[in-house]
Image (cartoon, coloured by chain):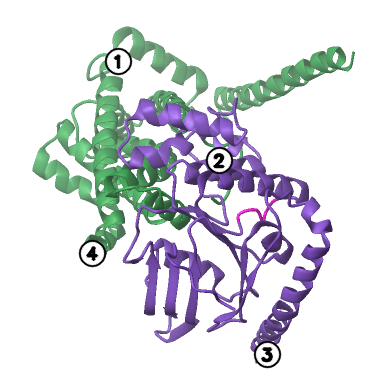
Chain colours: A purple, B green
Amino acid sequence: MSQSIANPMIQFMGVDKHFVRPDGQAQPVLRNLNFAIAAGEFCAIVGPTGCGKSTTLNLTAGLEPATAGEVRVMGQAVRGLHPNCGYMFQTDASFPWKSVLDNVAAGLIFRGMDKPTARSRAQEWVRRVGLAGFEHHYPHQISGGMKKRVAMAQSLITEPKILLMDEPFAALDVQTRALMENELLSLWSETGASVLFVTHDLEEAIAMADKVIVLSAGPNSTLKATYQIDLPRPRNVTEIKFEPAFARTYQQIWEDLKSEVMISYERQQSRATA
Amino acid sequence: MNGSKAAPRRNLRNVLDLTLQWSILALLLGSWELFTRKQWVDPFFFGQPTGIYHVIVTWMREGTAVGPLWEQVTVTLEETVLSFIIGVLFGIVAGFLLGRSRWLSVIFAPYIRVINAIPRIVLAPLFIIWLGLGMASKVALGVTLVFFIVFYNVFQGVREVDRNLVNNARILGAAERHLVWHVQLPSALSWIISSLHTSFGFALVGAVVGEFLGATHGLGYLIAMAQGTFNTNAVFAAMIILSVTALVADWLVSALERRLIGWRPAAASERAA
């Protein structure tokens, strides 16, 4: 199933991850995780609640260390944060005290660019994500969808080789969500970055990704299956759902995912009654 | 059409509200005056609105027993503002250092808790012994009051910076100094500002209490002297002047607040981040 990639952008090699619980016990999250993402590949990770999808992103970004095994980015073992990642968090992480423009410019300023240059580059990105005219608004003054646009521009402006996205559009209404998904695809196609996209929505995963990774039910989950999605690009996430190939793929992956979701559900039930 | 009808009605509402507010004041002062005039209550112990007014006017025209009125006001204000500024600065620096460093906060936590547990007003006699009857002892007392309020707010503000924001900043390439200036300080700022209102009140308390216990000038000293001579009207007069001063100061702090944290939503400022 997993084909070998010559020069993988991201590579998980036998990665285990344990968290330490407040009582000092180790809580296993991921076990023997192996996968690789090629340069420019869009990979979606799906799996039941609590299976460690977000942890995979944190390991890639270097926000958390692997307990065993190795995560490699561009052939280098990840030890702490590295400058190759952009990260769109599940919840809003824009700086509430900075205007839209300054939020977008932040990454460039942190990386040592002088303010005027950073601002004019940010201006360009604000325009590209469709927020022209809102440069001087503060985050609390704009809608949820617009905040996502800010987050998108904020992470893309540093031209990351890898874009990590943790259910970025989960909180949006259906129409806004489809709109944002299409915009993300078009922005991504211009960058050539590798994307690791965590979602619980299988439709979203198939509509956007080149490859879908299914994780097994947590705790201590591992790779259940990898699917190559051979739908043509450029895609429109709304229209592609009408393709027969989409439905076939969906059915195939859902069979895998369904059993894991059921296992996860039963475990939660038994934990709740225990 | 609706608008043209609604506007006068709103104006009427405002006029009515204002009238009611003022009539309550008039009623209170009127009955106070009446009761004391009729000797139903003893004006010697309870004072009299007209008497208070006369005291204020006399103070303004002829000065108080210890010098001109404006001098007393300036002395108290100077003590207040000095202890406010010094206390706030120390509070911010200490709160920030301990908030950022787990190690420092572990070492100093018990000391801070112990000092904070002392009702700090009892330090006033010590400060007067050490620093004399002048301004320094009042400022020292005010500083100890202000410091802890600001310190705890800043400490909390730095500690409770949204993890998400810190992670986001670090992934965007923020170094430690960027985290301080772009994330931790702005995040603590709303806590600092909200503590300023309370702090200014406490700075004033420090100055006045210090003056009660031993001073040669100031509004607190005026009150202490009036108390010594059973001059109820003068106690009230000094109280009113103090209140007006405090109100003006509070208004200034509010103006500062609006300037510094304009990024916050107007009403839902306490909404969880």
Tags 4 and 1 both on a single chain: yes
Label 4 belongs to which residue?
Answer: B103
Foreground: disc 4 or disc 1: 4
- Mark identifier at residue A238: none
Subunit of mark 1? B
Residue position for label 1: B70
Q: Are marks 4 and 3 on the same chain?
A: no
Q: Which chain is indicated by disc 4?
A: B
Q: Amino acid at mark 2?
A: Val
Instruction: Kindly identify which chain the residue marked by label 2 belongs to.
Output: A
Q: Which mark is residue A150?
A: 2
Q: Are marks 3 and 2 on the same chain?
A: yes
- Residue beneath disc 3: A270
Q: Are marks 1 and 3 in contact (CB under 8 Å)?
A: no
Left or right: B67 with respect to A129? Answer: left
Kindly report the distance in space between the C-alpha atoms of the residues bearing marks 4 and 1.
Answer: 48 Å
Q: Where does the N terminus of chain A fall, quadrant-wise? A: bottom right
Q: Which residues are magenta?
A: A168-172
Whether residue A94 can be seen here? no
Q: In the rendered view, does A52 fall on the left or right side of A65?
A: right
Instruction: Kindly identify the amino acid type of the residue bearing the numbered disc 1.
Output: Trp
Q: Main secondary structure of the magenta part?
A: loop
How many angstroms separate mark 3 from mark 2 (CA)? Answer: 42 Å
Q: Amino acid at mark 4?
A: Trp
- Foreground: disc 3 or disc 2: 2
The residues tagged by marks 2 and 4 sit, at their Cα atoms, a distance apart of: 36 Å
